[in-house]
Image (cartoon, rainbow, N blue to C red):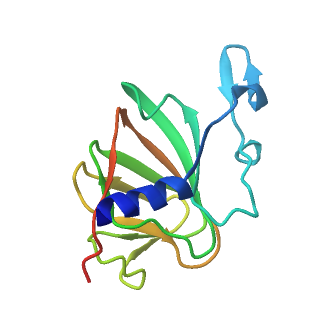
Amino acid sequence: MKKALIFLSLAGSFFFSFYSLNAAEMVDDFVVIQLDDIEWDENLNEVQRRVIYGDPDTEGLYIMRVRFWPGGSSLPHYHTQDRFVTVIEGTWHAGTDASHDMENTTAIPPGGFMIHPAGAVHYDGSRGGPVVVEIRGMGPVVTEYVDIVP
């Protein structure tokens, strides 16, 4: 029951939308999406995701951008597929257990990279200003939340 409540509260906190390619620049057959083309709700204190390619719910490659508000983080969880994360903006903090202790994380600055192996419990987010990461992976992928273990 507790896992279900955590999942439902987190599911409601994730703002999910597919990126509209109408805003992207078309150059011949190429699609160009500039960092400033991705719109974030600056008044929303929730993790925001923008899928810019593919669909994490279906088979195949997907690419998304995730924005953590200042001080925002995810609860401990794991994914059913490997995910490849590059920090785009801000300093991202990643923890590799179920403690959700943001003081016990690895700081990863812009340009840094991390692999989240399938099934590996982790949590992540911001300990300062806003953070934007790019996540790549193969779908379908499911995120499973776990209980916090102090």
Relative to 102, residue 109 above or below: above
Residue at (40%, 67%) from the top-left corner? 75
Residue at (29%, 44%) from the top-left corner? 82
| Quadrant containing the C terminus in the rendered view | bottom left
Q: How many marks?
A: 0
Which residue occupies the foreground of this view, 12 or 64? 12
Which residue occupies the foreground of this view, 90 or 5? 5
Relative to 14, residue 98 above or below: below
Splitting the image into 4 quarters, where does residue 146 fall? bottom left
Horizontal and vertical percent position of residue 73: 49, 69
Residue 71 visible at all: yes
Q: Residue furthest top?
A: 29
Which residue occupies the foreground of this view, 77 or 109? 77
Indicate left or right for 143 with 10 as reference: left
Indicate left or right for 140 with 14 as reference: left
Horizontal and vertical percent position of residue 108: 46, 68
Indicate left or right for 5 with 39 as reference: left
Horizontal and vertical percent position of residue 54: 50, 28
Relative to 126, residue 7 above or below: above
Residue at (35%, 46%) from the top-left corner? 83
Q: Residue furthest front?
A: 1
Horizontal and vertical percent position of residue 7: 39, 57
Residue 88 visible at all: no
Residue at (43%, 67%) from the top-left corner? 124
